[in-house]
Amino acid sequence: MNEKNVKAAIIMPEIDNAIRSLFEALICVDESGEKCVVADHNSELDNLFSDLPDMNDVNYQVLREKMIKDIHPEDREEFSRFTDHKWYIEQLSVNVHTSIECRIRHSDNRYYWSEIIICNTTIEDSTTGNGCLLMIRDIDTRKVRELNEEAKERAILSRLQDKYDTLFVENMTDQQTGCYNRKGLKYYSDIVICEAVNNSRNLFVCVSDLNGLKHLNDTYGHAAGDEALLAVANVLTASAPTGSKIVRIGGDEFLIFAAIDPASNEADIFPDKVDKGIEEYNKSHSNPYQVGASYGWVVLPPKEGMSSLDEYIEMADAKMYEMRQIRDKYRRS
């Protein structure tokens, strides 16, 4: 035996011991993918291998099906694909090794995270030949720590997202009435126009004014005006078509818009619902004044290349002005 062989004889057992201590199980699969040898396994995995009659002559598919039953249900599909002979041979044709992380049930009937590595049994950096070595390595401590850290990070991100969502809504909301403000108008009008265009819907656009706000403020105080504004906002919200956005665009002026189904009758019943809602509100309180509103609306398909609601708002505003001439006895000329 020459010096090189002597060194190899000394080193190889140490390498063999190191490999066996690093992995929970070592399985050698032949090139056909039909037979395998269980070279080694720890006692934690006795449930996988203990009833095999001959560790040196195992049907690979039988062992694979047996292992699938001890894989966590959420990981079985990936494990089944990963250990399919045709699949891993295809992977090993371009990579020296491939791996997955999954949970394996141990002899104590608990699932533990493991990394399963499949590598070629050919010479270093060679991808020729279909024989392979399947190695199972315990990664439970590291994986559980990583998952806990990820859970903490997700919780932090969730809280930040909640705060962002809250600030986002607050930034576009009129604090007095709870309706959107002009920032909300710009943001949601683009969305509603796109919805109408993409889904062949009509645009419902309504402009509404609270009648006599200045009279209420001057006669009964700003608290009365604020209460009246909120009452009208609530009635408009309850009466508007499904999915409508309600915007306070001025001191006493509201805008409603939505993309509605052409077959819907929600626009037709909208005025009756508004009038009934305001009537019910006036009957429900003993204030020495009556709340009233004027409104005008249009229902039209979106125009080609439409980028804003301005034209439809002007049309609805003109109709609202006509109603206000009749209903608002305190209107300014």
Image (cartoon, rainbow, N blue to C red):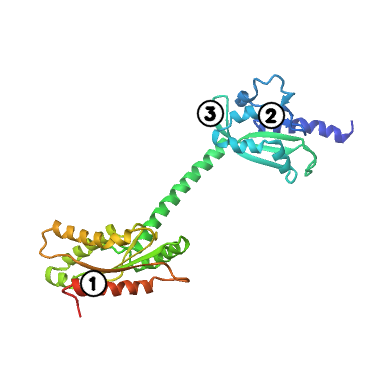
Residue 68 image point, x, y percent? 61, 31
Question: Residue reaching furthest bottom?
Answer: 333
Alpha carbon separation for disc pair 3 and 2: 24 Å
Neighbour class for label 3 at 10 Å: few (<14), some, many (≥20)?
few
Extreme residue in the front direction? 263
Q: Which of 37 and 231 is in front in this view?
A: 231
Q: Is residue 86 left or right of residue 199?
A: right
Q: What residue type is labelled 3?
A: Arg
Q: Quadrant of residue 280?
A: bottom left
Mark 3 or mark 2: which comes first in sequence?
2
Q: Where the N terminus falls, by quadrant?
A: top right
In this view, the residue farthest toward the right is 2
Rendered view: 187 above or below 29: below
Q: Which label is found at residue 61?
A: 2
The residue pinned by badge 1 equals: 323
Mark 2 in CB contact with mark 1 (< 8 angstroms): no
Q: Mark 3 points at which residue?
A: 110
- Name the quadrant containing residue 269: bottom left
For the question of whether residue 53 can be seen, the reply is yes
Frontmost of labels 2 and 1 is: 1
Local packing at callout 2 (Cα closer than 10 Å; few below 14, some 14-19, many 20+) is: some
Q: In percent of the image, x 12 and y 71: which residue is there? A: 219
CA distance separating discs 2 and 1: 81 Å
Q: How far apart are marks 1 and 3 (CA)?
A: 74 Å
Horizontal and vertical percent position of residue 212: 18, 71
Amino acid at the residue labelled 1: Met
281 versus 54 height, above or below: below
Marks 2 and 1, the one that precedes in the sequence = 2
- Quarter of the image with the C terminus in it: bottom left
Q: Residue at (57%, 27%) from the top-left corner? A: 106
Q: Earlier in the sequence, mark 1 or mark 3?
A: 3
Q: Is residue 79 above or below residue 318?
A: above
